[in-house]
DNA sequence: ATTGCAATAGGGGATTCACCTATTAACATT
DNA sequence: AATGTTAATAGGTGAATCCCCTATTGCAAT
């Protein structure tokens, strides 16, 4: 496509703690005439250092880094260069991450399982100022954002009513339906309805997913 | 080093579901005159197919593959080619994996975080018939193998059998009993027994507690 | 008044849990 | 060679939970 341009190739920064993955990405990128790997980093510290000293057209960040939480890194990078788009690379299929990444200011999210073409497509889309996420992910995110335009500032957990939130917290503590009912002096049936409504509001399909979501949410509240 | 040899380069099979990682590894290996990437696979099924049809001097396996547990793959590969050494590549720092890999017949374990030199060293060491593991790991493993304090060192998760561990990981991903059974081609009953045994070994009382424990454990593994 | 939603709870069928037993194969021990 | 151990498989059964409905009450906003 639009690669015939005489302009200099776009300078890309790669941040990943796996040398082999960096090599693979660099190989792919440097093979394109309009793209170029300008620098590599294997830690968050190194990445911030580079970003503060040089200008890049795009940063390709792995979210799981040894020294820092990937989301924190996105925020730091964006604080330094708000105009530089950030594309996040991850091995996790997780919806939770995609949401957080976009909220932290990332402009895209792609899985390591993807092949070269999709990678290049994502890179070019983000370079063009657009957002890139996978189909399933975008469907879900759009659903969450559009279905409830009113109260969606922040995590979907805010959409829970007080009682639902109370139940949600107990679930996150590993407490079962029966025990929750006892503890809140409710019928098991009522707790079941709350669970169903919570699942609905958080767009979760199964009971196990609900427990996982709740556990993660509770844990994320404790340390931060 | 010993690369002046006139013999044909050693044929290596790469199994990894991340295209970029494969490219990186291939780049590294093909740059060495005494080594050569003979084939690549991105699933366990494909790998077994290749191994059954061709001879390789070494297999480089990623333990986390989409279609099959990595430990099972090691066993399958070794059943087909007992003489072919297997070097396992993983992104996980954990001792638990190294132990299991060696017990399953793997001849080495190296992390994706390592750089090219260490990779080549590991490959050559395994090709030479020796075992390769990191320093910390070998220390810990020797301790476990020699000392009889095997009861309780580190997390109780290592008390789980391979199959139990597999189920445990799926639980931690928020996957329900039925779906686990389907995915592993087992009866629901079998999965239930595994869950019960896991609960026993980890001293957990209810199903919800099990999910919580598993979610936390999995999370602690991949976002360092 | 009417609409909307939170909170409560039940019915009923499908599924899972929790506690049993049982078989087979692989290994270790004797 | 006989025995014991353990992992992996799976069935039976009753209780609990899940998941899909409906239904009532109360309160707040329209």
Image: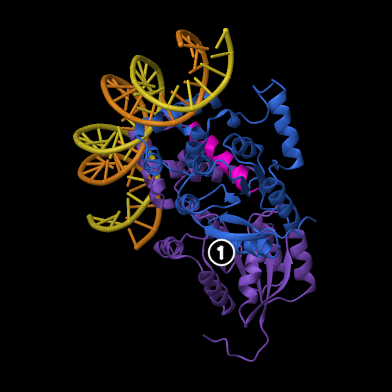
Chain colours: A purple, B blue, C yellow, D orange
- Give the labeled residue for mark 1: A102
- B151 or A132, nearer to the observer: B151
Q: Residue shown at 55%/73% (left/top)? A: A120
Q: Is residue A134 above or below residue A93?
A: below
Q: Is residue B76 above or below residue B121?
A: above
- Where residue A224 appears, x then y in whole percent? 66, 48
Q: How many marks?
A: 1
Q: Is residue B67 visible?
A: yes
Q: Is residue A132 magenta?
A: no
- Where residue A8 appears, x then y in whole percent? 68, 86
Magenta segment: B209-224
Q: Is residue B214 above or below residue B21?
A: above
Q: Is residue A21 visible?
A: no
Local crowd at mark 1 within 10 Å, few (<14), some, or many (≥20)?
A: many
- B163 or A79, nearer to the observer: B163
The rendered magenta stretch, by its main secondary structure, is classed as helix
- Where residue B130 appears, x then y in whole percent? 70, 41
- Say whether residue A190 is left or right of residue A151: left
- Where residue B34 appears, x then y in whole percent? 70, 59
Q: Chain of mark 1?
A: A
Q: Residue shown at 68%/62% (left/top)? A: B28
Q: Residue shown at 64%/63% (left/top)? A: B24
Q: Is residue B210 magenta?
A: yes
């Amino acid at each position: 496509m639009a690669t015939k341009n005489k302009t200099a190739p776009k300078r890309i920064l790669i941040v990943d703690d796996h040398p082999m993955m960096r090599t693979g990405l660099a190989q792919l990128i440097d093979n394109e005439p309009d793209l170029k790997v300008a620098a590599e980093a294997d830690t968050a510290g190194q990445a911030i250092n580079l970003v503060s000293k040089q200008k890049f057209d795009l940063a390709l960040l792995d979210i799981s880094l040894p020294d820092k939480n990937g989301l924190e890194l996105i925020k730091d990078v964006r604080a330094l260069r708000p105009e530089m788009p950030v594309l996040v690379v991850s091995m996790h299929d997780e919806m939770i991450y995609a949401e957080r990444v976009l909220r932290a200011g990332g402009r895209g999210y792609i899985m390591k399982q993807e092949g070269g073409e999709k990678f290049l497509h994502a890179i070019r889309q983000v370079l063009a100022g657009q957002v890139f996420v996978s189909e399933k992910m975008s469907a879900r995110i759009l659903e969450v954002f559009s279905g409830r335009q009113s109260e969606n500032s922040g995590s979907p957990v805010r959409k829970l009513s007080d009682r639902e939130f109370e139940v949600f917290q107990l679930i996150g503590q590993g407490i079962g339906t029966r025990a929750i009912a006892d503890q809140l002096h409710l019928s098991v049936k009522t707790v079941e309805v709350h669970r169903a409504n919570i699942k609905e509001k958080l767009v979760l399909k199964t009971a196990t997913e609900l427990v996982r979501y709740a556990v993660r949410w509770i844990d994320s509240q404790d340390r931060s």
